[in-house]
Image: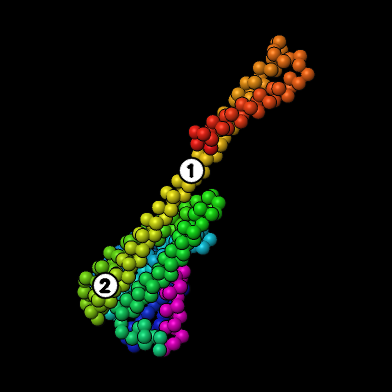
Amino acid sequence: MSIEVINYGRLVWVNCIAPTSEDMAYLRERFGFHPLDLEDCLSTIERPKIDEYDDYMFIVMHFPRYHSARKVTRPSEVDFFIGPNFFVTVHDGALKPMQRIWQACRESSEERQYWMGKGAGRLLYNILDRMVDYVFPMLNKIGGKISRIEENMFTQDMPDILQEISLLRRDIIALRRVMRPQLSILHNLERKERPYLQEDLDVYFGDVADAFARAGDIADEYHEVIEGLSATADSVTSYRINEIMRILTVISVIMLPLTLISGIYGMNIDLPLDEHPYSFFYVMALMLLVSISMLIYFRHRRWL
């Protein structure tokens, strides 16, 4: 089994990483959890929710975790069972704040007193508070990437800029999708009292909800900024394409009369200056004169 247990006073914290069917059987036997809740712990597609029973509460929450290989934020699920004298967490072990809190409680009695000394409700608040603090450095990194894109918008190669914008926009969309459903869970914890949570924790959960809302507002602002940068990049790309097309069009238009002249003098018929020893140079001079005249005309019309 992948279950570890820490006891402090009347509270027992059971931590399960990468749960298996055997782990769920152990939790059901020891705590009597509902089979559907235990089934949800084995699933990786559960939406955030709260299920309440007479003697415990089951919470499913998702927290953002940046996947460096894919360069995108992915949700990491944490399942909580909270009762009057027990606190059970089920997760995949990928969230660093959760692991740090668990390691601290396992290694130090002072840390156990700090995290677990005030009951399961306060432990839940402390973990959620630490998890929301974990989101802001991720937002700061996104803000730094946006600043670099703004600085390099008109100096760096546009394909690289467009790739960075696309990756960052995907990351911001994924982050917003992870964070939004958590607010309803936090507001539920804030507004409703539970008899098996010993303290009045509405103010504490309200503080965490405010922090999540603030992080969500920052993510929404970044989304608007990256959409604006994307539109700007598209405009710059279109402008550069138009400039290239204009140059190519001018070249094509200049070549058209030159092709006509060379085609006429390439025909097998009698033409003026055919027998003149300098006919080639006269034709070339005519073609050069036509080209220069057209360039002067284009310049006059401000097409160049």
Residue 140 magenta: no
Task: Confirm whether residue 148 shows in the render.
Answer: yes
Q: Residues within 10 Å of mark 1 (few under 14, many from 20)?
A: few
On screen, residue 236 above or below 296: below
Q: Earlier in the sequence, mark 1 or mark 2?
A: 2
Q: Position of residue 73 (x, y in %)?
A: 44, 61
On screen, residue 294 above or below 112: above
On screen, residue 97 above or below 169: below
Residue named by callout 1 = 239
Q: Position of residue 244 (x, y in %)?
A: 55, 39
Q: Quadrant of residue 90?
A: bottom left
Say how the picture is coloured: rainbow
On screen, residue 134 versus residue 206, left or right, reads: right
Region in magenta = 90-109
Label 1 close to label 2 by CB (< 8 Å): no
Residue named by callout 2 = 206
> Main structural element of the magenta stretch: helix, strand or loop?
helix
Which residue lies at the image location 63% right of the left edge and 25% below the top edge? 258
Mark 1 vs mark 2, foreground winner is 1
Q: Amino acid at mark 2?
A: Gly
On screen, residue 105 versus residue 240, left or right, reads: left
Tell me the number on the disc at residue 110.
none
Which residue lies at the image location 24% right of the left edge and 72% below the top edge? 190
Q: Work out whether residue 28 or residue 9 is closer to the camera in this orientation and state it.
A: 9
Which residue lies at the image location 45% right of the left edge and 75% below the top edge? 99
Q: Position of residue 36 (x, y in %)?
A: 32, 64
**CA separation, marks 1 and 2?**
49 Å
Q: Amino acid at mark 1?
A: Tyr
